[in-house]
Amino acid sequence: MATLIVSYPKHEGARFDAAYYTATHIPLVERLWTAHGFTGAEVLLPAGDQPWAAAVLLRFASQAAVDAALASPDTPQIMGDVGNFTDIAPVIYRAGD
């Protein structure tokens, strides 16, 4: 299994719509990337005052599946949706198999 970790670090005046993120964006990711080896997501929302607005663990069958999802023609639609819930630039990490 491979994991893509996406976090949203807070900054002064940052906007993050957690309701949209969980109800609309994550289902979009699931719908578009499942065919590429995506197996699930774990959304982490902060409890109290934290230095980040949210993070998500995106699980994939393998690193090759992560590569396939990121290279898919559906990825621009996913990335294009980011502005609908935040003005924070996401920070993306990979965790190994």
Image: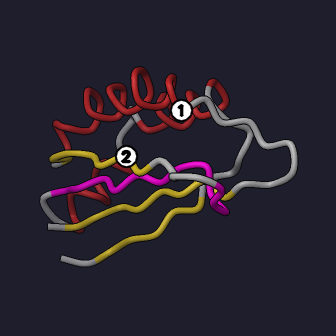
Residue 56 lies within the magenta run: yes
Residue 54 vertical position relative to residue 95 in the rendered view, above or below: above
Alpha carbon separation for disc pair 2 and 1: 10 Å
The type of residue carrying mark 1 is Ala
Asked whether the beta carbons under mark 2 and mark 1 sit within 8 Å of each other, the answer is no
Mark 1 packing: few (<14 Cα in 10 Å), some, or many (20+)? some
- In this picture, is 17 found above or below 65? above
Secondary structure at badge 1 equals helix
Residue indicated by mark 1: 18
85 left or right of 96? right
**Figure quadrant of the N terminus:** bottom left
Q: Which residue is mark 2?
A: 43
Residue 35 vs residue 43: left or right?
left
Choose top left, top right, bottom left or bottom right for residue 94: bottom left
Task: Name the residue at 37% across, 46% down.
Answer: 43
Q: Which residues are magenta?
A: 49-60
Q: Amino acid at mark 2?
A: Val
Residue 97 shown left or right of residue 12 in the figure = left
Task: Write the residue at 67% across / 63% down.
Answer: 51
Q: Quadrant of residue 32?
A: top left
Can you say whether 24 is above or below 33 in the image? above
Residue occupying the point 26% across, 78% down: 96
> Is residue 29 shown in magenta?
no
Crowd band around label 2 with a 10 angstrom C-alpha radius: few (<14), some (14–19), many (20+): some
Q: Secondary structure at mark 2?
A: strand
Colour mapping used in the image? secondary structure
Can you say whether 36 is above or below 11 in the image? above
